[in-house]
Structure formats: C-alpha cells, structure tokens
Image (cartoon, rainbow, N blue to C red):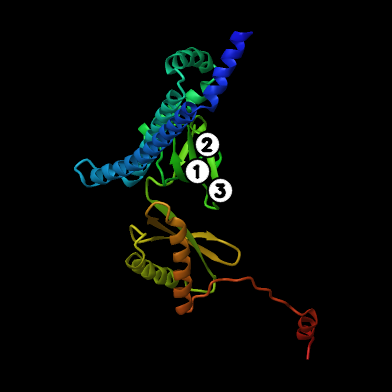
Amino acid sequence: MEEVISQWDKAVEYLTGPDLWIALAQGLLKILLILFISLLIVRVGSKVISRFFENRRRGPFKITARRESTLKKLVVNTMTYIVYFTAFIMILEVFTIKIGPLLAGAGVAGLAIGFGAQNLVRDIISGFFIIFEDQFSVGDYILTSGVEGFVEEIGLRTSKIKSWTGEIHILPNGNVTQVTNYSIYNSIAVVDVRIAYENDIEQAEQVIAELLEELPERYEQMTAVPELLGVDHLNASEVIMRIIGETVPMEHWGIARVIRKEVKQRLQEKGIEIPYPRIVMYSRHEEESAQEPT
C-alpha cells in the first residue's frame, strides 16, 4: 500500500512539476516548426516547378501548353503528398511513437487491404496511362462517361471536369474507358442559310462567297476562308445553303454565330430576303362574285 501511495505521489509531482510543461512546450514548438517548414517547402517547391516548366518552354525540347499544365499540376500534387506524409511521420516521432513497428504492421495490413482496394489500384494505373499516353490534358474539352466539359485537373486517382454551366464532375480514372477529345484538332463550324424561292439563288451565292472571303481578316479564330457548299436542301418555302468553316479548336460555336450575323446583314444590304412564315387568305365570296357573268 505504501508503494502505491509513493508512486501516486511521484505521478502527481511530475504532473504538477515544471518538467512536464517544458516537455509539452518543446513538443508543441517542434510540431509548429515542422508544419511551418512543410508549408514553406510546398510553396517554394511549387515556384521551382513552375520555373522549371517555363524554362522547358523556352528550351530546345518544348512541350505543348496543355501538356505543361497537366504535368505541372501532377508534380505539384505529388510533391505536396510526399511533404505532408513526411511531416506526419515526424510529428509522430515528436510524440515518441515508434515508426518502425507501425510501418511493419502497415505492410502486413496493406497486403490484406490490397485485395479489397482493387478499384483504387485500377484508378491509379489508369491515371498513369492517361497522362503517359496524353489521352487528354488540362484545358481540353472532352466527353467521357456521360460527362462533357473542360478538364480542370488530372490526379493520380481522379480527374475533375467542369461543364460549361459551371458544375464540377469528379470521375475516378478507372471509369474513363472511352474519351472523345474535341481540343486536339481544329473544329468545323457548320451554318445553314435559308433563302426564299423568290430570290435569285446565283446572286445569293455570289454575295455570300464575297463575304466569306473577307471574314478571316476580321476573325483570327478562322484558319481558312469558309466554304460555301451550295444548295443543301429544298424545303417547302425556302432553299437551304450550307457553309462550313475551319476554326481553331473549340471556337466553332462562336464562329458559327458570327457567320450567321454577317450573312444576315450582307443579304439584307443586297435586298435578298430571308424567308419567314406567311399566311395567304382567300375570300370565298370575292371568288364567287368574280366568276358571276356581268
């Protein structure tokens, strides 16, 4: 009994003594120092990585801008994970927790967990091949797994795609099985122009062709002079002529709107009518009175 009381007195003396508070203060200072150094390494490392890619842009072995954005984000994210994991290990050491047995246990547990983490492994491997094969990059406009939008980020496990209305879709890389990339090659703008049957079709074609020659000088998104294919359809009250124009990637929607506006204004200036719905009414009484003999 006396021995228990003696140990209790020693414990109370240690808890109320200055040694405990000094040890706690030293531990807290070490943790704050580790966190500060980690944040500093991440910030400086990010700037160094950005500077490295800028030098590569000016060097003899250049990479495309879309490839640069993808690799730069991936390297920064990987570096951040490594730095924070190392900081976590160092904080455990501050609490006098032995890392060796934890890592050994984690290795044995990881082997068991690995059989149940097949999707995670598949996502990481798929992400590696997406980047290695350059299937798509940051900034590309793609369609995959029912999601369409701009690629915001490609990670080791997931990819983030932003739709044109602002939603962010996060897809596991393992689900990216088929990709349609709209940003690699030039796009084609398709415009249908409707002309009334009462107008001279050859005159309308000549007016439109002259206009199309002028457009590339005013709109740098056009890579070539748009082409008038001619009459595409004969509808009940109109003739439809089709125009196609090659543009830089993902600019075909904007250029199509520009072509429609320019064509409408030029046809209006030349007195060529664009058809609109009409209603012709006949009076039966007037028709009967016209047929009566005078």
Disc 1 target residue: 161
Q: Is residue 17 above or below residue 194?
A: above
Q: Secondary structure at mark 2?
A: strand
On the image, the x and y values in percent for residue 166 come to 54, 51
Disc 2 target residue: 171
Q: Is residue 35 above or below residue 276?
A: above
Q: Is residue 222 above or below residue 202?
A: above
Q: Quadrant of the C terminus?
A: bottom right
Report whether residue 27 is seen. Answer: yes
Q: Which residue is the extreme one toward the bottom?
A: 294
Residue 5, by quadrant, is top right
The one of 174 and 36 positioned closer to us in this rendering: 36
Q: Quadrant of the N terminus?
A: top right
Disc 3 target residue: 167
The one of 166 and 272 positioned closer to us in this rendering: 166
Q: Secondary structure at mark 1?
A: strand
Q: Secondary structure at mark 3?
A: loop
Report the Cα–Cα distance between label 1 and label 2: 8 Å
Q: Is residue 188 above or below residue 289?
A: above
The amino acid on which the numbered mark 1 sits, given as a three-letter code, is Ile
Q: Residues within 10 Å of mark 3 (few under 14, many from 20)?
A: few
Q: Which residue is the extreme one toward the left?
A: 60
Residue displayed at 46% across by 74% down: 265
Residue 70, by quadrant, is top left
On the image, the x and y values in percent for residue 255 come to 43, 61
Q: Which one is earlier in the sequence, the residue at label 1 or at label 2?
A: 1
Q: Are marks 1 and 2 in contact (CB under 8 Å)?
A: yes
Residue displayed at 53% across by 13% down: 112
